[in-house]
Amino acid sequence: MQRINLAEKLAAVAHPWQPHTVAEFNGHDLMVARFQGEFRWHSHDDTDDLFLVLRGRVTLQLRSGNVELGPGELFVVPRGVEHCPRSDDGAEVLLMERTGTPNTGDAATAEPRRVL
Amino acid sequence: MQRINLAEKLAAVAHPWQPHTVAEFNGHDLMVARFQGEFRWHSHDDTDDLFLVLRGRVTLQLRSGNVELGPGELFVVPRGVEHCPRSDDGAEVLLMERTGTPNTGDAATAEPRRVL
């Protein structure tokens, strides 16, 4: 029964766009990740996608327009909605998705599940 | 499709121990709350309980010992585990529970669902 310090966990994350699971919650993974540059357009048919920015700025590009997030700001991308995260200057982010969700929306190209 | 600024939402929360829903995620409520003093011992049989401290300090009292949380620290109380949150000096917290969960563990004494 340990507390999770998000900054400590992020200190162990070297590369952008690699989610690292820090806790589990009702069949979901709570993950930290670094964002830098642009990810790729994708969607998740079976899960909403939570983004909470801890440091830096993130642009969530949606087909309907962009959502700009700074520290202490969150957004839930509804299931099935295409999105493409971007962070020009880098960001640290808390993510939540159903456990087993491929981060790219496609198991063939997804990052492996990493647990910190 | 609006970003959620947690500090702005908390500015509208006057009283401690009253969760306010700011977003929904896969059948769960993301809520902000102020903690001040001691809550009550309770558990939730059908949901894990996520606490992420945004400001101040929180002691999550468990029967097995205390978990001390500061800003940027989180803890997931597993379903069925008795807990009693406390914050002597006050805190602002992001919470997550399955939608419909009584905050006291008992519908008879629970706060109403408030949406911000």
Image: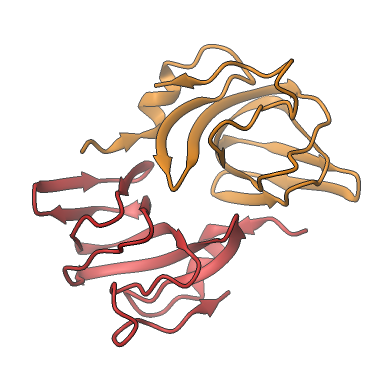
Chain colours: A red, B orange
Quadrant including the C terminus of chain A: bottom right
Left or right of A88 in this view: A24? right
Residue B13, image x, y percentages: 48, 16
At x 50% / y 32%, what residue is drawn? B31
Q: Is residue A88 above or below residue B51?
A: below
At x 45% / y 64%, what residue is drawn? A32
Residue A72, image x, y percentages: 38, 41
Q: Is residue A50 above or below residue B36?
A: below
Q: Residue furthest top?
A: B14
At x 29% / y 85%, what residue is drawn? A109
* Count of labels in the image: 0
Residue A52, image x, y percentages: 38, 49
Q: Is residue A60 above or below residue B83?
A: below
**Front-most of residues A87 and A84:** A84
At x 21% / y 55%, what residue is drawn? A81
Q: Residue furthest bottom?
A: A108
Quadrant including the N terminus of chain A: bottom right
**Front-most of residues B56 and A79:** A79
Left or right of B43 in this view: B13? left
Left or right of A51 in this view: B14? right
- The answer to which quarter of the image holds residue B70 is top right
- The answer to which quarter of the image holds residue B24 is top left
Q: Is residue B22 above or below residue A75?
A: above
Residue A7, image x, y percentages: 51, 60
**Front-most of residues A11 and B26:** B26
